Every structure is written in C-alpha cells, then in structure tokens.
Amino acid sequence: MARFEVPDGWTAQAYRFALDTTPAQVGVLVSHAGAARFAHNHMLALTKAVLDQRAAERTYGLPEDELTPSTGWSLPALRKTWNQRKDTAAPWWRENSKEAYNTGLDALARGLDAWSKSRTGERAGKAVGFPRFKSRRVERSVRFTTGVIRVETDRRHITLPRVGTIKAHESTRKLVRRLEAGTARILSATVVEDSSGRWFCSFQALVMSKARPAHALRSAHRVVGVDVGVRDLLVVAAPDGTEIRRVAAPKSLTAAQPRLRQLQRKAARQHGPRATATRAKRRPSKRWRKTQTRIGRIHARAADVRRDILHKVTTALAQQHNVVVVETLNVAGMGKAGGARKRGFNRALADAALAEFRRMLGYKTRWYGIQLVEADRYYPSSKTCSVCGGRKPNLTLADRTYTCDHCGARIDRDLNAATNLARLGETHTLGAQSPADSGSVAGRGATRETDPARAGEAGGREASTLHNPIRVGQAGTAVSQGTAA
C-alpha cells in the first residue's frame, strides 16, 4: 500500500457530525454500505477458493509453476479483478458510487496484508486470523475519498458523491471556519451507522498544527503524573504529592444495566433470528428488531457519556501542563483470564475505557506540543512508597490505602501511584532528584520489573490514518505517517 506523508506543520484530525437523514437518503446509504459488503465478500470468496485450489493441487504433486495462478492481495490488484467480474457478479453496480466498492476492497486488502504479515512474523502483536465474511448485521459504513466531498458554507449541510446534500444535526462551523481560512483540507469522509440507528459522517482532514489556546488555563504544576483505574477514572498528582485532580469513573454502562437487562430479557421472549429449540436461522419479528434498536440506543448513550468525559479530561491535561506521565497498561491482557469470577472486573474495565483515554491523550498532547512520558509496563508505581521509596510487593487490588512497611506512611493508593509517576517524569525530563531524596525514580531497582521509562511520541490514531508511533522523542517534533487507500 502507498504511504501517505503528512506535510510538515500539519496534522491529521477527524471531525464527526451526526446527520439528519431522510428515508430516501438512508436507503441510498444502506445501498452503498451493502455494496461495500458485497464487494468484500465476493473477492474474499474468490481469494479463498484460489488458495484452497492451490493447496489441493500441491497434494497432487504439481510443481509451483503449474498451480492455479494466484490472485493479487493489494488494493490495486483486487480492484482490477473486481472490475473484470463486476458486470457478471453485480450487474447493478452502477447504482452506487465506485467508492462503495473501493471501501470493501480496501478493508479486504488490509485484512489479507495483516494476516500475511502476522504469519511471517513481520507484524508484531497478537496473531491475526484470516479475514471473515461480513454480515448484514454488522456496523454499516462506507468511505468516500474522491468526488464531491464538501461541507456547505451554511454550516448545516454536507455533500457526498451520489448521495447528495444531507442535513447535519449539529453545526459544522468548527470545520468550515478552518476550510474558509485555508488551514484545513478534507482528505476523506466516512459515513457510519451506530448501534442506535443514527448515521454519522466523519471527515478526515489535514489541519495546520495547533497551539494551546490563549484562554486555556495554565496549571502551576509543570509536571504531573496520571494514575488511571476503574473506580476513579484518573488521579492527577504533582511530584511533591499534591493531588491536583480526581475524576470518578463515569460507569455509564453500569448505570444502564438495569434497563439493558429488562430489554434483553424481553428480546429473549420474542421471535428472534434463531429458533429457541433448534437454533435454526429464521426471519426475526418486527418487535424483536424494535427491541434491539432500543438496546442499541442505550449502548450508544452510554458510549456518548463515556466519550464526553474522556474528551474533557484529556483536553484539560494536554492544555494545562507541560509534561504528562502515564502508565503503559496491557488493557487487553488485563481482561483475559479469570472466567466468570472476573466478569464484574472485566465489565468495569471495559466501562472505564482506559485504552481510549491513552489514545486520546496521545494525539492531543501532540497537537499542543506537550511532552508525554510513558512509564514502563513493569514500573511499580503502585508498590513503591512515594515518601521513602520502599517496596511493598504483596499489594493487592483490595488495598485502597497504601501503608508502607518501612516508614509507616499511609497514603491513598491512587495518589501514591500518581505521585511516583510524576517524579518519574520530573527526573526523566529534567534530570533532577525526586523530592523524597531517594534518587532517580527511573533508575530505582533496575530489574525486569522496573525497566527505565520511555518518553513516548504522542501519536494518536485520527480517523483512518495509520500511524507509526515513535517511542522516544519530544511530542510535536515528529511527523505522523499513515496510509491512504
């Protein structure tokens, strides 16, 4: 895939707007999303058939040069094959924009590329499986990269290829102002339907680099540490142990559980997509679909509440401080093992959205030129006493108050961890001793458990641009890199 270079002095940013669609426009968007799904599934079936045929021919002893020719997996190759087959496979293809089919082919190309690199070891992380066929019941979306993609000057309408002009539910002034001033340029637009049935349009734009607003409050504490959790979403502390801010976890999903249980039990008694006894597929009833829509709206509301709080706290951290120190948590690994006994913890972990907090803080600190320091995953911020530097290895999650076995200090567990993180950032960025006069925090007990911290590049993941985060450097000095279809 071609590499996309973000110009110097610019950054990638997404603007997301809710849409007020008419029934006719919903039909057009559903048709485009279905076309993307059809192109993806058709070419995936062809690719899979060719792979199976080649595997079978190898069992016959045929040499490699006599096997069935393989199909290309890159986006240009898939698009070329699709253009050769679309008149037969989809004679109705002219009803939708070519961008709809390109959306499905691009998703397939990325999936095949990730699977191939994962098998050969070129891709780090968890093993990636072979792409699956997309279902009608999954999230509907389509991405436009060419054609008429415009935000109207009345700040209430957007225009997309083949879809036409759609009214926006909210004002688009934030993006329009930048477009009129020449400080932004639209790259693509992605239209997606969420679980509640509402359609949104996300514009991926190149935006001239930002600076901290003049009206933004400046904190007296230059360096702060941030400890995140499921009870308190975050605790912000200074190197001297001062608690600057404590934000309780929104727990929006927990608050919605009584209503969700009621509706899900109601849906279980209705005529669903599968028979209760035989589990055979069947056409669900209209009342079941209506109940599912109500369930989706509750989930969407919980997600909106969570997203609103995360945006507010991350923006405040990025605008008010110069150095922010965070933990490097393996959130995916924290919720794996445990079975039913960890069900409550896993739900609370998902409800807190700790990984989303780190993602938002990453790109916002890069926007405002703030340095983001990432403590090593094994740095014992919670087990180290912020007063004397002693260790308490037997600390459990149930211990909400840290009691030091060496000096007898009693400190709130989260405040103690945030203080240690702040001192780590102070010594790492300024080369100073910690206030407790216990030496460089980054170098304490240099074992496998406490490898030195790494200063992280605050590279986020805006819209669909893929980034290659750099682990060491000053935020705001590197250029984001990604791929474009």
Image: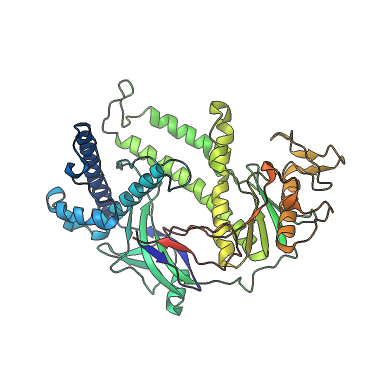
Q: Position of residue 45 (x, y in %)?
A: 23, 42
Q: Residue furthest top?
A: 277
Q: Position of residue 341 (x, y in %)?
A: 58, 27
Along the line of sight, which residue is nearer the eye, 409 or 266? 409
Decide if residue 305 is on the left or right side of residue 75.
Answer: right
In the rendered view, would you say 336 is above or below 314?
A: above
In the rendered view, would you say 255 is above or below 304?
A: above
- Please name the colour scheme applied to the rendered image: rainbow
Task: Name which quarter of the figure residue 372 lies in.
Answer: bottom right
Q: Position of residue 303 (x, y in %)?
A: 50, 48
Q: Can residue 26 be seen in this snapshot?
A: no
Residue at image point 43% right, 32% down? 264
Along the line of sight, which residue is nearer the eye, 288 or 59? 59
Residue at image point 66% right, 52% down? 453
Quarter holding the N terminus is bottom left
Q: Position of residue 396 (x, y in %)?
A: 71, 34
Task: Name which quarter of the figure residue 216 lies in.
Answer: bottom right
Q: Can residue 461 be seen in this snapshot?
A: yes
In the rendered view, would you say 453 is above or below 369?
A: above
Q: Residue furthest right?
A: 407
Residue at image point 71% right, 33% down? 398
